[in-house]
């Protein structure tokens, strides 16, 4: 199985801060890496697919980068509505594993 | 517009079999590259990928749960069914189904259904 490791597991930020979340795969997965945002009490929502493609309707302050084993999700200017847990997910090979999540507190 | 909705029991007893149905609209499960996946989330914990069925009826399962899971599709009803045998309290979770796009991501998710395992 491909293990996905996110860091940090939680972080606190102020409105306007730049925030970076890291996801590392236990083996190379090309760019088959997706990011989801899950707000409290809601289902996850796709933010970034194929490592760096912004899902339609997602604010441009979100961006993704990386390839191979190391990936990052960046929020350029954190907003109050970004309070959520963020998950990476590899779609390279079954089982299509998720990271353990990064909880963002504002 | 793609939508998915999970349905099934909210409470099951230990050792029972759980059957969950995902009813979807806005896409066809006969389209190349498309799939429907199941993901669960125990209260306060992370997402766990369970199973996926592809448009061509290829099926993939989490290795740790493979012996207990079965995923099937009924394209005429636009439904995907997940069964999980021998339920245990540790299986208490919100179960989500999601639309798998050709890129491999889960572009749209259902609202989820909380299943509690308790005697």
Image (cartoon, grey):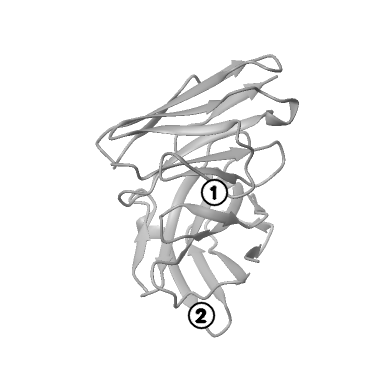
Above or below for B75 versus B118 = below
User: In the current view of this chain or complex, which residue is farthest to the front?
Assistant: A60
Residue A14 horizontal/vertical position (percent): 69, 14
Other-residue count near label 1 (Cα within 10 Å), few / some / many at <14 / 14–19 / ≥20? many
Farthest residue toward the bottom?
Answer: B76
What is the x, y in percent for residue B8? 65, 65
**Measured from the top left, where is residue B30 in percent x and y?**
44, 78
- For residue A53, above or below residue B1: above
Residue at which label 1 appears: B40
Q: For this rendering, which residue is in front, A25 or A41? A: A25
Of B118 and B39, which appears nearest the observer? B39
Q: Position of residue B21 (x, y in %)?
A: 59, 68
Look at the numbered disc 2 and give the secondary structure of its residue.
strand
Residue under label 2: B74
Q: Nearer the viewer, residue B118 or B22?
A: B22
- Residue at the spot x=52%, y=57% of the render? B15
Give the CA separation, mark 1 to mark 2: 22 Å
Foreground mark, 1 or 2, reads 2
Q: Left or right: where does residue B36 sit relative to residue A97?
A: right
């Amino acid at each position: 199985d491909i293990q996905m490791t996110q860091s940090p597991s939680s972080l606190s930020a102020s409105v306007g801060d730049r925030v970076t979340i890291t996801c590392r795969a236990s083996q190379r997965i090309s760019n088959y890496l997706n990011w989801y945002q899950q707000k409290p009490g809601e289902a996850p929502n796709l933010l970034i697919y194929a490592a760096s493609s912004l899902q339609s309707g997602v604010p441009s302050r979100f961006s993704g980068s990386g390839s191979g084993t190391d990936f990052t999700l960046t929020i350029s200017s954190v907003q109050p509505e970004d309070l959520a847990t963020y998950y990476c997910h590899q779609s390279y090979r079954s089982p299509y594993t998720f990271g353990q999540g990064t909880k963002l507190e504002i | 517009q793609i939508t998915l909705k999970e349905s099934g029991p909210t409470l099951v007893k230990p050792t029972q079999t759980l059957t969950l149905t995902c009813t979807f609209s806005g896409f066809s499960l006969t389209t190349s590259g498309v799939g429907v996946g199941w993901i669960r989330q125990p209260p306060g914990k992370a997402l766990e990928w369970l199973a996926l069925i592809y448009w061509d009826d290829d099926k993939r399962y989490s290795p740790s749960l493979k012996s207990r899971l079965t995923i099937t599709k009924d394209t005429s009803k636009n439904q995907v069914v997940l069964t999980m045998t021998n339920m245990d309290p540790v299986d208490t979770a919100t179960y989500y189904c999601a639309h798998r796009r050709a890129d491999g991501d889960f572009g749209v998710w259902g609202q989820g259904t909380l299943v509690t395992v308790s005697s």
